[in-house]
Image (tube, grey):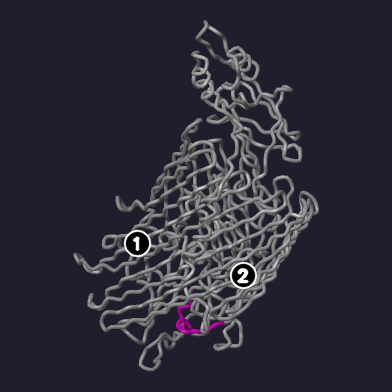
């Protein structure tokens, strides 16, 4: 399937890459490299212990100094070293002191002291924190020690002991720079755990660098982590079916570095395919979305890699009971950096208990079944990111991602004919940022994204081959202008063009049958918004204009986000937004992909309506010392909801109708933390009702109507090496439709069908699960760090029923057979990771 604009906008974007540039000058110099230059220049030889000097950085080039005596004088006065002439040619360099003491002050850009910042000696398990004045002191240091300064929301600083010398006083002054979080500043820096923050605009951010431990997980799965937040659920334990405030999963839009992802998962939805080792942060927006983002009538999830260049090569390798992976960051020079990662399933070598559990969960009640002996399943993903700083004002980033899942299933022992499912995603994107002047910034971005799902299924004793395919191709280009009137007020405006193509195809060889549905949509969007922020207020008001050419519809989407901070403890916020999306997923149980993947993407047309939403929410956050209470109320209306997208497996599952959904809820979070432990309790009370007027004039509970949901968790940090986490989930059972026990089946024309009662009038039993993890730091020095993690999902091995439905009994057509979808069983996992 070809898209008209596929090549044209990429040509324009890559022209930017070849613009003439001016390179930043280097502002620090390796002492070791400078000594080598001095040796060549003056024909001298330095004698030293390399570990004493290899990490020292100088603020000027001593190789430019005109005499060797002046160089010796500089070393003696500007470093913790002493240089002594042995004879005319040889010079010794040694530390002045074995036990060095340093002190200093930490400030932000406004010269305000930063307290409680972590000051750590790299490779060792001790350090200190800054006091209320930002002051710190460290003793018993060696000249070779590196000191790292960390504070959440600020860029870390790494300095060698020698660099912490003040030329004008005993104690040095350091300025920490805030990380780029636009105007929506951090309000809460430790939200549930130290890796989570809540911004003034109500969004939640996960910083992967600070991620330590979370119950059940041995790797920082970014999408799994989102489920600890109130209002975020997965009714079937799959991250591909995450519901935010009762919206179905296709109403969440996921962007990886401005690239829209149509399926960022492995194992058909059980684990995230976005490598966390290169992803810096994840942002979850439930409401009050910026006008520059399209789609996602229920939520927007942003995954971002780091934009800052590193000075040294870093990377790591790791393995667990599901996969093995590796990643590396290579600074090519002072303006160009390459990052890449890979991950591959390890079941080609052996089947672990974790793999067996995931396999059973994924393929239960499908044509594949739960036996791994006659099936071959594998997955892999590759990420590549290229950063290029043209100069201090112009930056370019190019990203590529590939995600692949393959399944071969042999119905007959010894048969060469295999049923197959291939699910893959490919995407490439480019983002160019330019700072025109102190007030004006421009960003131009574009991407090409492709998702495909293909299955070959042999039926009727392998005499019939059914081929099914679902494909989505998307091009996008967006230009944004940001103008700052002053430090408090700015204006952001821009234009976006999306071209999306969706293909659905079914082909049968005997008898010959071929059905192809192909749709292409051009979406033109213009957006503008203003942002005002100061110590008390955050106000963002904007509007997005959309035109959809295929259906000739226009939408106007106002969005407002207001936050008022009464003091450092109390905050109030309110959000309102209207959104729309033109792609959605439908579920067809009669025309599925081996029963493994039942969802396929479709596009709005004359039969499928545009999905539109309106949402209003208010909330308040109270934090005092280490205690936190967060409260939110929301109401959401969604129109254009398809019956076939809701996952019904009853009397209406094959109907082609649209209706509306209304959801109302309360979200509460309590959090208490100290230096050793973190405790949280979350609770969500919500209702979600559907209305399809062609069926009934009354609302009825939707499949995602989980009335009560609560989670409780506890993290404990024994010391720098050992951490544990345990958590539990309890929530209401989902609504189900039961059958008429007096007459289980009825005749419908020539077919016998299940005789269901009223829609969703009963519920499954409540769901509960306990998870546990432990993390041990095996090794940490200046070069390497090694961790081992052990986790268990469903510690108590409780068998939970996630969903149920009925089919006509094959042996007695007057009876119905109940089919139950079961939860993940007791699932242990172990990971070992080495980073450098």
Q: x%, y% of residue 257?
A: 54, 56
* Residue beneath the point at 35% across and 74% down: 468
Marks 1 and 2: CB-CB under 8 Å?
Answer: no
Q: Quadrant of residue 805?
A: bottom left
Give the class, few, some or many, for how many residues have Cα within 10 Å of label 1's Cα (few <14, many ≥20).
Answer: some
**Would residue 394 be seen by someone viewing this image from the given angle?**
yes
Secondary structure of the residue carrying tag 2 is strand
Secondary structure of the residue carrying tag 1 is strand
Region rendered in magenta: 647-658
Residue with the most extreme front position: 20
Decide which of 762, 131 is in the foreground and name it. 131
Residue 771 vs residue 268: left or right? right
Give the class, few, some or many, for how many residues have Cα within 10 Å of label 2's Cα (few <14, many ≥20).
Answer: many
* Residue beneath the point at 48% across and 40% down: 332
* Residue beneath the point at 39% across and 68% down: 453
Q: Quadrant of residue 420?
A: bottom left
Decide which of 709, 209 is in the foreground and name it. 209
In the picture, the quarter occupied by the N terminus is bottom left
The image shows residue 173, relative to residue 304, as above or below, that is above
Spatial CA distance of label 1 from label 2 is: 37 Å
**Chief SS of the magenta region:** loop
The residue to which callout 2 is attached is 525
The residue to which callout 1 is attached is 406
């Amino acid at each position: 399937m070809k898209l008209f604009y596929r090549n044209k906008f990429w040509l324009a974007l890559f022209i930017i890459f070849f613009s003439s540039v001016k390179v930043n000058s280097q502002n620090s110099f390796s002492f070791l490299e400078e000594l080598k230059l001095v040796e060549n220049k003056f024909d001298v030889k330095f004698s030293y212990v390399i570990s004493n000097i290899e990490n020292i950085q100088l603020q000027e080039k001593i190789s430019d100094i005109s005499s060797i005596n002046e160089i010796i004088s500089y070393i003696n006065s500007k470093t913790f070293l002493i240089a002594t002439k042995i004879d005319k040619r040889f010079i010794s360099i040694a530390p002045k002191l074995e036990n060095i003491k340093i002190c200093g002050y930490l400030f932000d850009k406004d010269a305000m002291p930063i307290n409680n910042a972590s000051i750590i000696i790299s490779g060792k398990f001790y350090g200190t924190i800054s006091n209320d004045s930002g002051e710190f002191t460290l003793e018993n240091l060696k000249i070779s020690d590196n000191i790292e300064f960390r504070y959440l929301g600020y860029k870390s600083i790494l300095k060698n002991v020698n660099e912490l010398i003040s030329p004008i006083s005993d104690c040095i002054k350091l300025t920490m720079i805030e990380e780029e979080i636009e105007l929506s500043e951090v309000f809460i820096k430790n939200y549930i755990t130290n890796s989570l923050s809540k911004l003034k605009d109500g969004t939640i951010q996960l910083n992967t660098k600070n991620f330590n431990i979370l119950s059940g997980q041995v790797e920082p799965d970014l999408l799994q982590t989102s489920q600890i937040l109130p209002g975020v659920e997965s009714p079937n334990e799959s991250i591909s079916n995450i519901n935010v405030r009762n919206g179905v999963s296709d109403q969440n839009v996921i962007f990886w570095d401005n690239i829209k992802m149509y399926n960022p998962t492995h194992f058909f939805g059980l684990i995230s395919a976005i490598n966390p080792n290169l992803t810096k942060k994840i942002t979850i927006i439930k409401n009050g979305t910026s006008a520059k983002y399209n789609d996602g009538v229920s939520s927007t999830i942003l995954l971002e890699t780091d934009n800052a260049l590193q000075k040294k090569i870093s990377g790591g390798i790791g393995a667990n009971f599901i996969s093995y992976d590796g990643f590396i960051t290579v600074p090519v020079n002072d303006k160009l950096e390459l990052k890449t990662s890979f991950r591959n399933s390890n079941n080609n070598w052996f089947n672990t208990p974790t793999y067996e559990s995931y396999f059973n969960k994924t393929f239960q009640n499908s044509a594949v079944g739960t036996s791994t002996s006659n099936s071959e399943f594998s997955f892999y993903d590759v990420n590549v990111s290229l950063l290029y700083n043209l100069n201090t004002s112009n930056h370019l980033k190019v990203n590529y991602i590939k995600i692949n899942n393959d399944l071969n299933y042999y119905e007959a022992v010894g048969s060469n004919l295999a049923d197959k499912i291939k699910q893959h995603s490919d995407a490439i994107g480019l983002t160019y940022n330019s700072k025109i002047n102190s007030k004006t910034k421009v960003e131009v971005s574009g991407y090409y994204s492709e998702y495909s799902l293909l299955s070959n299924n042999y039926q009727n004793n392998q005499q019939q081959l059914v081929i099914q395919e679902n494909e989505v191709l998307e091009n996008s280009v967006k230009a944004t202008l940001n103008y700052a009137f002053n430090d408090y007020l700015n204006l952001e405006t821009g234009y976006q063009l999306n071209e999306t193509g969706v293909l659905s195809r079914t082909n049968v060889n005997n008898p010959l049958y071929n059905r192809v549905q192909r749709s292409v949509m051009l979406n033109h969007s213009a957006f503008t918004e203003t942002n005002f922020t100061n110590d008390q207020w955050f106000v963002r008001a904007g509007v997005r204009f959309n035109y959809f050419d295929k259906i000739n519809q226009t939408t106007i989407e106002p969005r407002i986000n207001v936050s008022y901070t009464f003091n450092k403890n109390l905050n109030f916020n309110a959000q309102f937004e209207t959104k729309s999306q033109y792609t959605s997923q439908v579920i067809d149980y009669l025309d599925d992909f081996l029963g493994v993947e039942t969802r396929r993407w479709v596009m709005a047309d004359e039969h499928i309506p545009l999905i539109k939403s309106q949402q209003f929410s208010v909330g308040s956050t109270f934090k005092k010392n280490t205690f936190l209470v967060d409260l939110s109320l929301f109401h959401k209306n969604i129109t254009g909801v398809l019956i076939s997208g809701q996952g019904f497996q009853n009397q209406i599952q094959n109907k082609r109708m649209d209706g509306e959904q209304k959801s109302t809820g309360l979200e509460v979070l309590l959090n208490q933390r100290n230096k050793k432990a973190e405790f949280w309790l979350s609770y969500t009370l919500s209702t979600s009702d559907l209305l399809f007027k062609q069926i009934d004039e009354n609302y009825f509970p939707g499949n995602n109507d989980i009335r009560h949901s609560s989670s409780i968790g506890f993290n404990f940090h024994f010391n720098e090496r050992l951490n544990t986490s345990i958590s539990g989930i309890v929530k209401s059972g989902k609504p189900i439709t039961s059958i008429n026990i007096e007459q289980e089946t009825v005749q419908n024309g020539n077919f016998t069908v299940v005789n269901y009662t009223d829609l969703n009038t009963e519920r499954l039993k409540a769901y509960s699960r306990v998870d546990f993890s432990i993390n041990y730091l095996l090794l940490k020095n200046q070069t390497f760090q090694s961790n081992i993690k052990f986790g268990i999902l469903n510690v108590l091995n409780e068998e939970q029923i996630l969903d149920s439905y009925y089919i006509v009994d094959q042996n007695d057509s007057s009876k119905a057979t109940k089919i139950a979808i079961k939860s993940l069983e007791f699932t242990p996992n172990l990971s070992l990771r080495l980073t450098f």
